[in-house]
Amino acid sequence: MKIEHVALYARDLDAMLRFYVERLGARPGPRYENRERGFSSYFVSFASGCRLELMSLASLIESPASVGGDARLGYAHLALSLGSEDAVDRLTEELRAAGITVLSGPRRTGDGYYESAVLDPEGNVIELTA
């Protein structure tokens, strides 16, 4: 069994698409729209084959679980493996220079990961790991 994709709702779908494509190197798929439901989405794919579905819904309800920062039930973070500590260092600094919020790192964690944590445009925590 493998995870086929992870889906994230977004208030600003275009900003999310730009972040994952321009900043994290994902390849975008075509936009899907269901005008009757007010739903739009993109699948973005990473070189490893991992996919992320970025979704927007006109009737999207804000909740504490959709705000980054504090610990909460449910989604905690998305970890992307970059393959090396140098790659984590480089991308973290590129993102910081571009004004992306860096929450932590790069650092070695107690469980042995080399990582940094950043926020995507919707406040979702993204771990960049070696």
Image (cartoon, helix red, strand yellow):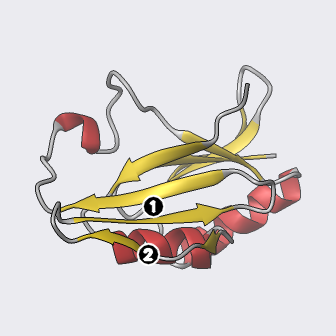
Residue at horizontal 49 percent and vertical 78 percent from the top? 18
Q: Position of residue 76 (x, y in %)?
A: 45, 32
Q: Are marks 1 and 2 in contact (CB under 8 Å)?
A: no
Where residue 55 sits, quadrant-wise, is bottom left
- The answer to which of 72 and 57 lies nearer the viewer is 57
Q: Specify which label sits upstream in the sequence, 1 or 2.
A: 2
Res. 119 in view:
no
**Helix, strand or loop status at disc 1:** loop
Q: Between tags 1 and 2, which lies in front?
A: 2
Residue at horizontal 42 percent and vertical 32 percent from the top? 75
Q: Residue at label 2?
A: 31
Disc 2: CA contacts within 10 A as few (<14), some (14-19) or many (>=20): few
- The answer to which of 124 and 45 lies nearer the viewer is 45
**Helix, strand or loop status at disc 2:** loop
Label annotation for residue 37: none
Quick check: 89 above or below 18? above
Q: Position of residue 66 (x, y in %)?
A: 27, 43
Q: Residue at label 1?
A: 101
CA–CA distance in space, label 1 to label 2: 27 Å
Q: Amino acid at mark 2?
A: Arg
Where residue 78 sits, quadrant-wise, is top right
Does residue 61 appear to the left or right of 27 in the view shown?
Answer: left
Quadrant where the image shows the N terminus:
top right
Q: Amino acid at mark 1?
A: Thr
